[in-house]
Amino acid sequence: MKLNITLREFSSITHGTIHGLDLDAVIDGVVYDSRLIQSGEGKVFFALNGKFRKGNDFISDAYKNGVRFFVVNKEAQLSQNDVTYLIVKDPLEALIKLAKHHRSKFDIPIITIVGTHGKTIVKEWLGILLGEKYQVVKSPKSYNSKLGVAMSILELSRDTEIAIFEASITEEGEGALFQKLLNPSHGILTHTGDKYDHNFRNKDDKKKEYLQLFQNAKKVFYESESFDDLFKGDNYVKVQISSFTKELQKLGFTQVIKKVNASICLKVVLYFKVNVALEKGTLPDLAMRLESFDGVENSIILNDTYSFDLDSLETSLQYLSSIEKGEKRIVLLPQMDNSNNKGILELLKKYQIDNYHFIKSKSDINFSLSDSIILVVGGKDSNMNKISAQLKLKQHRTKIEINLNAIRKNIHLVKDRLSSDTKCLIMVKANAYGCGLIKVGRYIEKIGADYLGVAYPDEGVTLRKNGVKCPILVLNTGIDDFQDCINYHLEPSVYSLSILDEFVKMLIANEIKGFPIHLKVDTGMKRLGIHPIEVEKFITILKSQPEISLKGVYSHFAESDNIENPKFTETQLERFLEVCSKISERVSGSFIRHISNSEGALNFPKGQLDMVRLGLVVYGISNNRKINSDLRSVIKWSSQVAQVKTVKKGDTVGYGRAYIAKNEMNIAIIPVGYADGFRRSLGNGKGSIFINGQVFYTVGNVCMDMVIVDISNENIRPGDFVEIIGEHQSLSQFATLLDTIPYEVLTSLSDRVHRNYIIN
């Protein structure tokens, strides 16, 4: 972005009060994340408050990176005399005012996309198609919040001919807000489900928000029949799949949702009179986000090969630069004419990337990748996606996709329902519920969680060895584990007086004083924990042993999801508070009180206290009706069809000849089995998978590495996409098939299944 406005103008636009130096100093860019600042010259830092952080806490970091202008809600204290503050009521509102002012300078088509699903894919596809004729600016990645929309608008420049922005309407009033901010000339409404319905009085009110957003739009494109009664007039264009049958065949789409999204894009492209030669791959399957996975030679691969321009490259380099310093970084780029390299080289220099290589194939990699973080970038026409796949440590067709962005959104969703002073401990035990301890643990620390929780010290040791520095609570500590807790600064749970005695002895032997511990109290769960009548003895030991320091006291609700009969939960809370009061009366200093798990935090606000421990809700599962529809799915489990066969009447299928074909039939063999987590109990028609969006059921017994499904007369081919858990079959639904709970499904997913990590 290149704003090119003076501080005086900036103050007038945002209605702020300036404290500082030269009012004629020029600002050309906005930053709000101190980790991503490469050069602070000419930049203004907006001190935005997040779920876990206060923006003012990062002013000094921004200053170290060269920023001298700050937008704050109160003057921060920096001893330097070359700092200028703009004091406003709310820095985010000030940023929105700046974006609104910037938008007013442009008289070009502004296409705004809304809906609960499909916004980003439609935006990216439109960018590809309209880019054949126009200079297009579009929202980076999934920037659709108030902050994201404001930052997207600031990317508009004199060269822009069409802008494509996505916006997320999640509550009443946002339709009007985004209308004033974006003033869209054209609108697109993608699929609308029941997401965020609880924030509106009824569905009609939610629809009216979309109507408000598009009140001045020349054309609005939509597909859903449910809006026919609302969208009346020549400016509303109904999109029908049947109008683009030939085009969709050329694109090779079989799934209905892809056909819908593509049809919307094609209708818009016709409106803007853009001619595009369509073929399979013109509109690629886009990850939309940075994909991360383990690579060869102990490397980590960051795959961003769906789009390649300077904006997308800079976004990827920003993320690469935010990773902990000291890591070896390599950037792999597609080979191209030297005339196209200037802007790329400038960005690589800006982000201090010295180790970069322009390559055509994997054979060009004649240098070491060992222990590196490797960013692979390139467009759909390059060979870079293939190269990225070749660098994977595990080359399996079956994979699990972990959406780290969904984890962040789920945490924030719960955080919104907590007291502002309540801390969050995020559980990452059992390999982060099967999602990957190291990657998930590091990511959760990065987004600002107060604590991590593990079951055993070895999990905490692994996190420490991989750079995690935040406090870690160990729930189950044995005598043999004490030294690891000491060596790696892990905070142990003390659940018996005998364990406490042994730990004190170990601390004395190590000549350590004031080591933090958490006391576990059994208030009715009848698992680990001291009985409330033992608290007096604990207090005596605590006061007499300087080796230990009480960091926290906690317990665990037995049935916090039972809101119909909350009596036992309320009794547990009363017992716990009595214990905490008794300790507070006798012991100097404060300690963290925590008893609520995910369901407890949501169902019993009184039990939130000083900290809550969030588990399965982080990974997208909750029994709470108010939040369940808004939670993001974190995992997708998929595979590909390995082979298709015709089975004659009377033939048998699989081990034990458990299935006998009643008629001639076709079967598909999928490379996933009980060794991966697809249990034997799902055989013989009890389990289901989806191929190209259509459900198929198992035949015969599930094998260790394979499962067989009846595909009847459907046109299924080897290589077709197979969904085990995902859009059509959720984690909860899959758990129901297994007659178990989502916890068990997640923690039973085999390590041999390759995991891809999606990062916004």
Image (cartoon, rainbow, N blue to C red):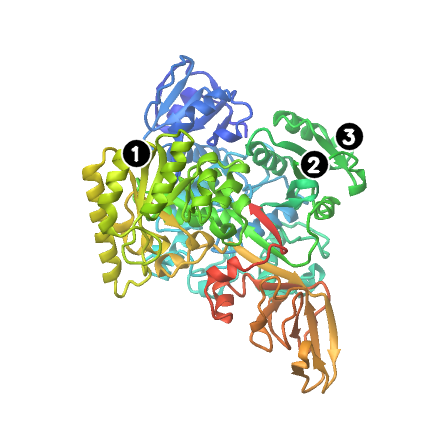
Residue 538: which quarter of the image? top left
Dot 3 corresponds to which residue?
Answer: 338
Mark 3 or mark 1, which is nearer the start of the sequence?
Answer: 3
* Label 3 residue SS: helix
- Residue at 55 percent across and 33 percent down: it is 322
- The label number, if any, that marks residue 370 in the structure image: 2
Q: Nearer the viewer, residue 167 or 745?
A: 745
Mark 1 or mark 2, which is nearer the start of the sequence?
Answer: 2
**Image quadrant in which the N terminus is located:** top right
**Image quadrant in which the C terminus is located:** top right
Dot 1 corresponds to which residue?
Answer: 545
Q: Are marks 1 and 3 in contact (CB under 8 Å)?
A: no
Q: As shown in the figure, which amino acid type bears the numbered disc 3?
A: Asn
Q: Position of residue 31 (x, y in %)?
A: 48, 30
Q: As shown in the figure, which amino acid type bears the numbered disc 1?
A: Gln
Q: Please state which of the two labelled residues, at mark 1 or mark 3, is closer to the viewer.
A: 1
